[in-house]
């Protein structure tokens, strides 16, 4: 079997408020990826600043933190072969107005702040972001009945 990788996604406040939670999660499930952790929460300012600390010096940082803390989000850990790059490809370009149709942003967004979803961009980012949202006992290990058809 190919090595499995985990990644973190966030369905941002625009995605939640636009009733897209189910559609977005279904895309990952339909692709054969495994949801191994999931929760809905309102992010604290402190956690938002920690999650986005690589962007601390950017001009949009304050707005970004204000936006991501503005309402409930859904955080999930997704497992699958090459989960980080597969999920980034499914999310599409950061700027929704440039994202390809067929991607999550390309189908649902024309914004750069309200761009529906966040997805870890590297194993290092995943390692930094994961503990902002989940403890190790919240990440589950289970098998699909039909894994031989997927992996
Ligand atoms: P995300 O994948 O969550 O990671 C950082 C976020 O910053 C990004 O999605 C965008 O929502 C946001 N972002 C990136 N560039 C800009 C920008 N120029 N103006 C406003 N927000 C931005």
Image: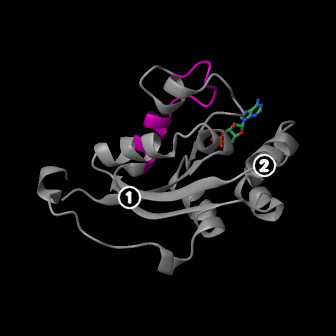
Q: Residue at x 23, y 56 (%)?
A: 2
Pointer 2 residue:
70
> Does residue 115 appear left or right of residue 2 in this picture?
right
Asked if residue 85 is among those painted magenta in the image, a careful observer would answer: yes
Q: Residue 129, position in %: x, y? A: 62, 60
Q: Residue 54, position in %: x, y? A: 74, 50
Which quadrant is home to the N terminus? bottom left
Q: Residue at x 43, y 47 (%)?
A: 25
Per the rendered image, the range of residues in magenta is 84-99
- Vertical placement of residue 75 versus 95, above or below: below
Residue at mark 2 to residue at mark 1: CA–CA distance: 30 Å
- Vertical placement of residue 124 versus 132, above or below: above
Q: Residue at x 45, y 45 (%)?
A: 22
Quadrant location of residue 61? top right
Q: Give the mark toward the camera: 2 or 1.
A: 2
Quadrant location of residue 78? bottom left
> Does residue 83 appear left or right of residue 138 in this picture?
left
Rendered image: mark on residue 5:
1
Mark positioned earlier in the residue sequence (2 or 1): 1
């Amino acid at each position: 079997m190919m090595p499995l990788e985990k990644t973190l996604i966030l369905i941002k406040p625009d995605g939640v408020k636009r009733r897209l939670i189910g559609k977005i999660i279904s895309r990952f499930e339909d692709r054969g990826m495994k949801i191994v952790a999931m929760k809905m929460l309102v992010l604290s300012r402190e956690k938002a600043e920690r999650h986005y600390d690589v962007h601390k010096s950017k001009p949009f940082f304050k707005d970004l933190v204000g936006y991501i803390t503005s309402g409930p989000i859904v955080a999930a850990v997704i497992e699958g072969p090459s989960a980080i790059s597969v999920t980034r490809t499914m999310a599409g370009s950061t700027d929704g107005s440039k994202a390809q149709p067929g991607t999550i942003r390309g189908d649902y967004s024309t914004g750069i702040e309200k761009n529906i979803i966040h997805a870890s961009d590297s194993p290092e980012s995943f390692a930094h972001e994961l503990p902002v949202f989940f403890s190790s006992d919240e990440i589950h290990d289970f098998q699909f009945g039909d894994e031989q058809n997927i992996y």
